[in-house]
Amino acid sequence: MAETSDNANKRTGVRAGQSNGMKNAASAHLVKKAAAANGIQKATTKGIKAGRPPLAKRPPAQVSKHVTHTKIRQFHQSQKELAKAEAKGDEVKAEELRKRLEDLGGLQAYQEASILGQSVDRGGDSSIVLMEWLKPDAAVMKDQEPKLTLLEVGALSTKNACSKSGLFEIERIDLFSQADGIIQQDFMERPLPTHDHEQFDIISLSLVLNFVPDAEGRGEMLRRTTQFLDRRAPREMPDTLQKTYPALFLVLPAACILNSRYMDEERLTLIMASLGYVQLQRKLSAKLVYYLWQLRDQSVPEEQKFTKSLVNPGGGRNNFSVVLKG
């Protein structure tokens, strides 16, 4: 489809903010979309970083799947308890939990388990599900020039399914990047777009929202995604792509939605609808729930009144919640 000069400039605009970790010209253009001169930075305020340990280099693959999952689960539980203790100002309890984390092997042990647990050979590449959903449109996407743009928040690898597809121009960010091609940046501190060429056609939030340490922060993260998605770009896309983009790929531990006192699928759908999202796809696995949402409607601030309310009473449930205020 022919584009106007303005549209072509929008779709191919220079993306500000170059990462020191990117060492060749082929990958350099992928990081030019950071919105402002200071867009690439380490998180300095309490955001995702407070809830998520950093990553490290890939460990040897001989660690068993059971050990990997156990270590990740223990770290998650200890991190949740630590966040609660710090919020209450209970320094004695907080110090006890920090010691427990050290006894589990420290951040290095978590890093190794995290990367191994999400390796392709363990079935941990969530973008495989995304690519399955987009497969019917792959031929049309392949012909798109320029390519559709993807912001991958919490990126672990430059070799996952969406990267190998060749269908996207991808910008990858993570709090503790240790790989070329992944910018070290907190999504919650990323400067808001001032031009449409700083926005994206699709955002991936895979196992990211659950690491935000408080319910209001999770709501703000979901709200923030709407500001980084390009509503205008689909107008230049073929009709088949206009039915999907702009989009948000959201992955959460299934227990966050299916076994929480304060959250269920109906409540998540209402929260997303108030932000302008419409659910296109859903998949439930043994441990995770995957969603594909299209940002189709206008945000409705007066409907964004979601407090921490009990929706599933009873014991044996977790306290995951999302709070959204208009």
Image (tube, rainbow, N blue to C red):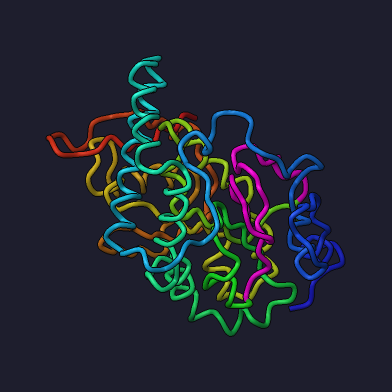
Residue 196, position as x, y percentages in the image? 74, 52
Residue at 75 percent across and 66 percent down: it is 27
Q: Which residues are magenta?
A: 167-195
Residue at 39 percent across and 61 percent down: it is 117
Farthest bottom residue in view: 139
Image quadrant of residue 263? top left
Q: Is residue 179 magenta?
A: yes
Farthest right residue in view: 5
Q: Nearer the viewer, residue 312 or 188?
A: 188
Residue 295, position as x, y percentages in the image? 53, 54
Note whether 268 is above or below 8 in the view shown: above
Residue 318, position as x, y percentages in the image? 24, 38
Image quadrant of residue 322? top left
Note whether 70 is above or below 47 in the view shown: below
Answer with left or right where residue 231 lies relative to residue 285: right
Note whether 34 is above or below 120 in the view shown: above
Residue 34, position as x, y percentages in the image? 74, 49
Q: Is residue 140 magenta?
A: no
Q: Nearer the viewer, residue 26 or 205?
A: 26
Answer with left or right where residue 235 lies relative to residue 243: right
Residue at 33 percent across and 29 percent down: it is 308
Residue at 37 percent across and 68 percent down: it is 62
Question: On the rendered image, what quadrant is the N terminus found in?
Answer: bottom right
Answer with left or right where residue 262 lies relative to residue 176: left
Instruction: Count the marks.
Output: 0
Image quadrant of residue 179? bottom right
